[in-house]
């Protein structure tokens, strides 16, 4: 079995942890479908602002999902002062069949310097809106909630004007973990449902259950309302995995029943040949119809499009939701 070496930031001691190969990535995945429709072909990011931010990200050794996942929207988001930062390392304890993150057991490893390091990076990058996300950390008692809270507080202390969205794992449904994040001073609590109920067992790790995700979102929303917290809740769906429109509509209803106000919908793209194939490419017209349906059903805001990702133009979604 392949192993990855982790270095303890306090002691400097190195130790090896196992990682699973075959359906996970150890390097950037290569595109597996070069015959995508034109509407899925995004222009390469260019311009002085993007180049400056890219240089700073490399200099600060910041791990952004924007680059690691080769997001097609990286240029647009960065130019508007938004970035998605992954905390808690790069090894996930789960193995979802749509995701190309390395799977293994981090064995409780957490970088105690991460909160200050991320806060400094956010300040130096001049970000206006930051999305914090992480791998699943089932090896930690709180699923990593404490680290989420510590990073959010550090960001807010250094740059109070920055809006922070936490795109969290499900914490195995642990309400105390959700409370920890909700009490950190964040602006948006996000957790992705990912797909419809029928496809969840095929698409997500067995520990990532449909109703568990809904329960996490429902608890976060109720907690915010009961305590008067100005925190929006948000979720995301992928399409193109074989779902039916009626199932998308049912998922919308389930999210609304859980109190979710913001929904993003985007096209699933297969990261490697080891992952689930794309069943179909959804047209821009169908995405527009999803948005119309979602708004009609009662979402505060719906961002729906082929290249939309859960954190796509998150600052714009936040502003439009606030003004609705």
Image (cartoon, rainbow, N blue to C red):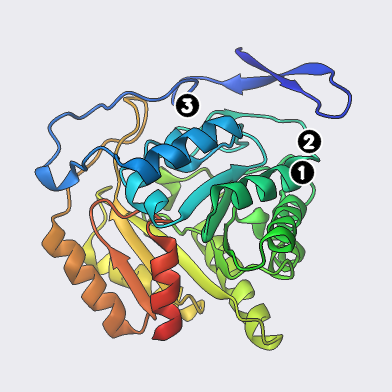
Q: Give the residue pinned by disc 3.
A: 24
Query: Do residues under tags 2 and 1 come within 8 Å of each other at their CB atoms?
Result: yes
Q: Residue at x 37, y 36 (%)?
A: 70
Q: Position of residue 86 (x, y in %)?
A: 58, 43
Secondary element under disc 2, as helix, strand or loop, is: loop
- Where in the figure is residue 231, as x and y percent of width and height? 59, 76
Q: Which residue is mark 2?
A: 108
Which residue is at 65% across, 15% downward? 3
Specify the quadrant that holds the C terminus: bottom left
Instruction: Determine whether label 2 and label 3 are within 8 Å by CB.
Output: no
Nearest to N terminus: mark 2 or mark 3 = 3
In the foreground, 234 or 123: 123
Viewer-closest of 159 and 275: 159
- Mark 3 lies on a secondary structure that is loop
**CA–CA distance between discs 2 and 3?**
21 Å
Q: What is the number of the mark on residue 88?
A: none
Q: Identify which residue, 121 or 288, lies in the foreground.
A: 121
Q: Mark 1 or mark 3: which comes first in sequence?
A: 3
Instruction: Please give the name of the residue rendered at 59% of the width and 52% of the height, measured from the top-left corner.
Output: 169
Can residue 151 be seen?
A: yes
- Residue at the front extreme of this rendering: 48
Q: Where is mark 1, residue-wise?
A: 140
The spot of residue 15 in percent (x, y) is 78, 17
Q: Are marks 1 and 3 in contact (CB under 8 Å)?
A: no
């Amino acid at each position: 079995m392949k192993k990855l070496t982790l270095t303890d930031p306090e002691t400097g001691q190195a130790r090896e942890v196992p990682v699973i190969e075959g359906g996970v990535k150890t390097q950037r995945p290569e595109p597996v479908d070069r015959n995508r429709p034109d509407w899925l072909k995004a222009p390469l990011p260019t311009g002085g602002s993007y180049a400056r931010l890219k240089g700073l990200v490399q200099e600060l050794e910041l791990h952004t999902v924007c680059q690691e996942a080769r997001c097609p929207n990286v240029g647009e988001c960065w130019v508007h002062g938004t970035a998605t930062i992954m905390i808690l390392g790069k090894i996930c304890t789960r193995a979802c069949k749509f995701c190309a993150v390395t799977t293994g057991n981090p064995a409780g490893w957490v970088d105690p310097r991460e909160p200050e390091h991320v806060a400094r990076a956010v300040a130096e990058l001049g970000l206006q809106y930051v999305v914090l996300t992480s791998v699943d950390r089932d090896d930690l008692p709180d699923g990593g909630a404490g680290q989420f809270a510590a990073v959010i507080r550090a960001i807010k202390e250094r740059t109070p004007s920055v809006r922070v969205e936490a795109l969290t794992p499900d914490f195995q449904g642990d309400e105390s973990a959700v409370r920890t994040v909700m009490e950190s001073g964040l602006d948006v609590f996000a957790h992705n449902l990912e797909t419809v109920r029928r496809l969840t067992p095929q698409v997500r790790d067995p520990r990532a259950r449909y109703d568990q995700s809904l329960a996490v979102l429902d608890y976060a929303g109720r907690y915010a309302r009961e305590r008067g917290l100005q925190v929006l809740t948000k979720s995301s769906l992928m399409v193109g995995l074989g779902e039916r429109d009626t199932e998308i509509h049912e998922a919308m209803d389930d999210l609304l029943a859980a109190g979710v106000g913001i929904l993003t919908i985007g096209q699933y793209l297969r990261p490697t040949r080891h992952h689930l194939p794309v069943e179909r490419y959804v047209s821009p017209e169908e995405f527009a119809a999803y948005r119309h349906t979602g708004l009609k059903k009662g979402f505060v805001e719906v961002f729906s499009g082929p290249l939309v990702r859960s954190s796509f133009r998150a600052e714009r979604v936040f502003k439009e939701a606030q003004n609705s």
